[in-house]
Image (tube, grey):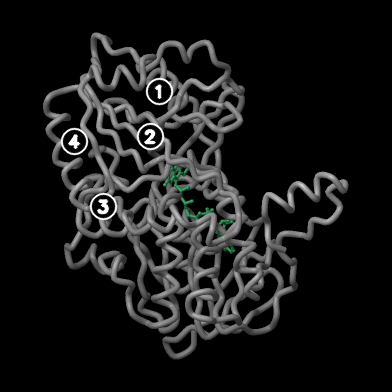
Amino acid sequence: MRYSGFKVLVQGLTGNRGWAPVWRTPDPRPAYDIVIIGGGGHGLSTAFYLAKTHGLRNIAVLEKGYLGGGNIGRNTTIVRADYSLPGNSEFYSHSLKLWEGLERELNFNVMHSQRGVIRLFHSDGQRDHYVFAGNAIANRGDGAELLDQDGLRRLVPYLDYDNARFPILGGLLHRRGGTARHDAVAWGYARGADGLGVDLVQNCEVTGIDIRNGAVTGVQTGRGPIRARKVAIVVAGRSSQVAAMAGLRLPIESHVLQAFVTEGLKPVVNHVISFGMGHFYISQSDKGGLVFGGDLDFYASYAQRGNLARQEQVMEAAMTLMPMIGKARVLRSWGGIMDMTPDGSPIIDKTPVDGLFLNAGWCYGGFKAVPASGEAFAHLIATGRPHPVARRFRLDRFRSGHLIDEEGAGSQHNLH
Ligand SMILES: Cc1cc2nc3c(=O)[nH]c(=O)nc-3n(C[C@H](O)[C@H](O)[C@H](O)COP(=O)(O)OP(=O)(O)OC[C@H]3O[C@@H](n4cnc5c(N)ncnc54)[C@H](O)[C@@H]3O)c2cc1C
């Protein structure tokens, strides 16, 4: 069923009885050409582009829970292309272009809103760094403007500019950045892939990876064995555990990242604001809730909840930046499991096992990557060659030394 304003009107007038389920719920078949482990944003977008761009149809996505129940439905929804280093820079620039046409491509409202992302600076040194970053972003054509304090005050008057410890001197504005509705991205890709014949199998945990003579032959699942010529691991925070089923040890640590949302308020935060000294970021959802987060909890864990010490630190950062937030009541907090690489950049590559592919290491920035990651991973799986925008995301870079040190820290807590 194609969605349109006209359909919404007709359905509204006829009791909303004509909507079809958004995707099928098939039982797994005994064999597929390609099995994708993980029904998060990256797994679903990979399936969609395999079917759409490469015309492949005999594909299953195996999800141990429900579609969109992982990090794709747990993040703070920030979409931006303000990276500076070769590798990340061209990849996220490409991803942003895909975002800009995504709703049309999927015929699904993912509520992509280019409201602008502002990174604040609080010292001359930080301003110089943002000048460098801004030039890199502007040279690529993704748009960056350096705002002095007066320019920033006109856009965001409610910040505490004269904070004694962290005075706000200005900001770097990336107008094409913004937010999108996170779970709608999963639903849109799921609907698109299902419409092209991909089987989306929920409640189907992969418990083993079958390998014969160095090549993958299938997977073991809670719903029986499934044969496959190609298997793709796309399980974000569970990457190390699933890769271990194939005897692989990944350069990844899993850490918890928390997010918070307040009660609905009238529109007040019209951009995404990122606090340069406190690792704090905030936006306002279309329902009115303030959505914000901070740093990792900084201990390895597979729990999808966080600890109180980090919550206190995030609230302190919020109060330092915009004291008026103290009047808002926090409704919910939650945690997701981050697949942290040592350099903070992802992996899209083949593994040493023939036919086994890996997409992982998105750290806390993989939401904005979903379109380009799916497209690049599908290209790799279908053709055996890396996509031009993802060719530096190699698994062996930690051995060869070709790191993409955007974060300069990755999961090394002491360096953050
Ligand atoms: C609090 C928080 C805030 C964030 N904020 C942002 C942000 O603002 N901007 C941004 O760009 N990124 C952000 N991120 C990061 C982003 O959400 C992730 O990098 C990205 O969603 C990970 O990829 P995914 O969507 O495929 O992961 P997931 O949605 O976690 O998908 C992986 C799936 O694999 C499944 N799985 C695991 N093991 C198995 C198995 N054995 N068998 C079958 N299925 C399995 C899981 O159930 C899960 O559904 C944030 C993350 C968190 C937690």
| Cβ atoms at labels 2 and 1 below 8 Å apart | yes
What's the CA distance linking mark 2 and mark 3?
16 Å
- Quarter occupied by the N terminus: bottom right
- Label 1: few (<14), some or many (≥20) within 10 Å? some
* Residue bearing mark 1: 313
Residue at 23% across, 35% down: 145
Image label count: 4
Question: Vertically, is 300 above or below 334?
Answer: below
* Residue bearing mark 2: 295
**Which image quadrant is residue 188 in?**
bottom right
Label 1 element class: helix
- Quarter occupied by the C terminus: top left
Q: Mark 4 or mark 2: which comes first in sequence?
A: 4
What's the CA distance linking mark 1 and mark 3?
24 Å
Q: What residue type is labelled 3?
A: Asp
What's the CA distance linking mark 4 and mark 1?
25 Å
Q: Mark 2 or mark 1: which comes first in sequence?
A: 2
Q: Mark 1 or mark 3: which comes first in sequence?
A: 1
Q: Mark 2 or mark 3: which comes first in sequence?
A: 2
